[in-house]
Amino acid sequence: MELLTINNVWMMICTALVFFMHLGFAFLEIGLTRQKNTINILFKNMFIITVGLLLYFLVGFNLMYPGFEEGATGIFGFAGFGLDAPLVEGALDLGYNEGYTYWTDFLFQGMFAATAATIVSGAVAERMKIGPFMIFTVLYIGLVYPIAGSWKWGEGFLHTMDTPFYDFAGSTLVHSVGGWAALVAVCLLGARIGKFKDGKIQAIRGHNIPLATAGVIILWLGWFGFNGGSVLSADPAGTSLTLVTTCLAAASGGIIAAFVSMLKFKNLDLTMFLNGILGGLVGITAGADQMSPTDAIVIGAVAGAIIVFAVSLIDRLKLDDPVGAIAVHLVCGIWGTLAVGIFGALASMQQFLSQLIGVAAYAGICIVSSYIIIFTLKKTMGIRVSEREELEGLDAHEHGMDAYPDFRLNEH
């Protein structure tokens, strides 16, 4: 009983840390975008957290953990609406798991669910209508994310392969799931006015880089819960190694991104440094518990380099991602997932092939589902604000508010 209490307390602390990450996402997103869209971004982030938890209660948890029967395809299952805690003699069954109770399990997993839509929010910032975004969030968090999650974490078909697909804390199941949808949304939405002019890429500066920096520090802190909690207990060896590999990957990702960016663009770009840190964190997430410290540094370093070239490629493809969400969460998520088959305790050709299968499976469900949802919204109610609304800012037109009523910057 004492060990369960210790484990459960650790899991609740990690739940709180993952919840705190939503503040980091909000700070990063508003910092890297323009002042006139701040309220809109904050509203979306608050909506994602609140509706995400309610949807995970209503259907998500039981879609993601349906308890596939033996012989099932492991693609879709549903254990019923709402939550039904296991009871023993009228009290909560404390034998549910040695690392946490049923209620802690729900809340910890629910915090992950909201993150996928937050990734999309950053990619579509400054030009997507709030209504269609909210509808997309409900469908993607409520249905797509938990069904996709069941394929691995719910012990579906990717988990039961001869060499199981491995994703410790969500490089694919969380980050790539959000990243694929972000890519589809950006393609269907189009670039912000002024981003590409006469065939040339124009920088649209964020209005508060100190706030974006604070957001990254908060996210790094939150990753202690994101990865540390994914040990699913307070096991001393597992949690301490995971936190070490997580931090080392973040550090090397940031350093390499800053260095490569300096060589490529001839300046020390803080925003690239910040995204390099995040890329390192995303990259290590799939195998944080399987890597040595040296492996983690290499994985983070590769992620940091990838960020610089991925951001440049996305710009050259005339895709407008204001916060770099696609490069960070999708590209580095894929890299981190494949790295499980290259580095660490699970490294083998069979594991690498299983990782490839997993990446392909999630690409399939995420691209198809997000395209159907967003394309339908585009054709029925429209997904993009008018030119006037975009130029004057979504805060005024969508919300009738100003984030800084007594302090206004000159913006274009």
Image (cartoon, grey):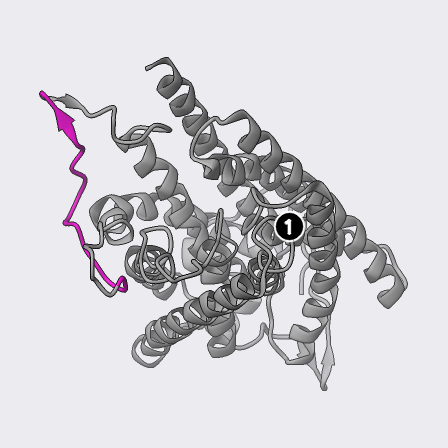
Q: Residue at x 62, y 42 (%)?
A: 215
Identify whether 404 is placed above or below 356. Answer: above
Classified by dominant secondary structure, the portion drawn in magenta counts as: loop
Extreme residue toward the bottom, this view: 198
Whole-percent x, y for residue 11 in the image: 42, 29
Q: Which residues are magenta?
A: 74-89
Whole-percent x, y for residue 140 in the image: 34, 61
| Residue 213 shown left or right of residue 108 in the figure | right
Identify whether 230 is placed above or below 315. Answer: above
Extreme residue toward the left, this view: 89
The image quadrant where one finds the N terminus is top left
Report the front residue among 195 and 404. 195
Where is residue 260, by image quadrant? bottom right
Res. 263 in view = yes
Is 86 included in the stretch rendered in magenta?
A: yes
Report the front residue among 336 and 38. 336
Report the front residue among 373 and 301. 301
Res. 195 in view = no
Q: Which structural element holds mark 1?
A: helix
Q: Amino acid at mark 1?
A: Leu
Q: Residue at x 48, y 55 (%)?
A: 166
Whole-percent x, y for residue 62 in the image: 23, 49
| Residue 199 shown left or right of residue 331 in the figure | right
Identify whether 105 is placed above or below 400. Answer: above
**Which residue position holds label 1?**
278
The image quadrant where one finds the C terminus is bottom right
Q: Residue at x 55, y 31 (%)?
A: 239
Q: Residue at x 76, y 48 (%)?
A: 252
Is 248 included in the stretch rendered in magenta?
A: no
